[in-house]
Amino acid sequence: MTASAVVLAYHDVGCRCLSVLLAHGLQIPLVVTHRDAPGENLWFGRVADLAALHDLTTVYAEDFDDAALAGRIAAEAPDFLFSFYFRRMLPAAVLDIPRVAALNMHGSLLPAFRGRVPVNWAVIRGARETGSTLHHMVAKPDAGDIVDQAPVPILPDDLAVDVFRKVSVAAEIVLDRSVPRLLSGTAARIPMDLSQGAYFGGRRPDDGRIDWTLPARAVHDLVRGVAPPYPGATTTIAGRPARVLRTTWQPVPTTLAPGTVYAQAGRMLAACGDGLAVPIIELEVDGQPVTAATLHRP
């Protein structure tokens, strides 16, 4: 008998992982996704579109409170419940529904970077690698036994979006090799040692403000961790609002005060707190692109 799974999913990871389950022949009686937020930058795949392509019954999480969502899922009596980049904490009443397991795909090498926006946090904190982890869901977020995980490198100039794309592929790989083991009952269950990681909360656009007194490496990591399609790192230049959209890790020594943005040898640089300046590749001042040639022009 073919196993069934209710899928709660959103974003690129949701699309890739839903595709994996379909490729393995699981029956998907219900997909739960999110409505796109008004004004959201939709640079990612839409699970609702993929579900419609496969004629899957789809509902939106925003239409249900916890009790109603539990009832709707329980009506399908699924063997498995999968959460792929779903934006809502699931209560015990939902986690207890599937006959076999409730599993989540998290965008880090758990227990590192538990919690919200793990890809952005990994880049901002200067991690050299991250990945995707398939794990059992329990009441405590990102704390259940690990089934499998796969690492991806974070290169010095990778933006968060670059890393997210790698993590999405890692999620597909992890799920693809885990599904047969889950179906046969041979999948690993590795207890998670939470002492080896930390929990991170969500980020707001205001958290992207640059502290130029920090070392150049920390400034560069913040810029690439919030670079478009995320809101970008913010500062002021000559009293005008600015966004630093991209830097590169080719620092140069400087004696200028932290926060000084200047042009040298045809490129823009910004002085940081450790006596190094980071080259700025893309900069906006008052919403307009600025180059080394136009820097500080009225």
Image: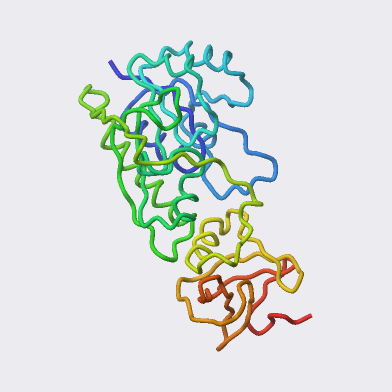
Quadrant, the C terminus: bottom right
- In the rendered image, which quarter is residue 175 located in? top left
Left or right of 179, for residue 59: right
Percent x, y of residue 157:
44, 66
Who's the residue at 45% across and 57% down the image?
162
Is 130 situated above or below 93?
Answer: below
Residue that extends furthest to the bottom in the rendered view of this protein: 265
Q: Please give the count of numbered marks on the rendered protein.
A: 0
Question: Considering depth in this image, is 290 or 17 the residue closer to the camera?
Answer: 290
Question: Considering depth in this image, is 211 or 180 the residue closer to the camera?
Answer: 211
Is residue 283 in view from this perspective? yes
Question: Considering depth in this image, is 101 or 2 the residue closer to the camera?
Answer: 101
Percent x, y of residue 293:
66, 85
Percent x, y of residue 288:
72, 70
Quadrant, the N terminus: top left
Is 70 situated above or below 217?
Answer: above
Question: Considering depth in this image, is 47 or 209 the residue closer to the camera?
Answer: 209
Is residue 15 in view from this perspective? no
- In the rendered image, which quarter is residue 66 located in? top right
Who's the residue at 35% across and 20% down the image?
101
Is 36 situated above or below 83?
Answer: below
Who's the residue at 47% across and 76% down the image?
251
Is 183 situated above or below 40?
Answer: above
Percent x, y of residue 55:
49, 28
Who's the residue at 59% across and 79% down the image?
268
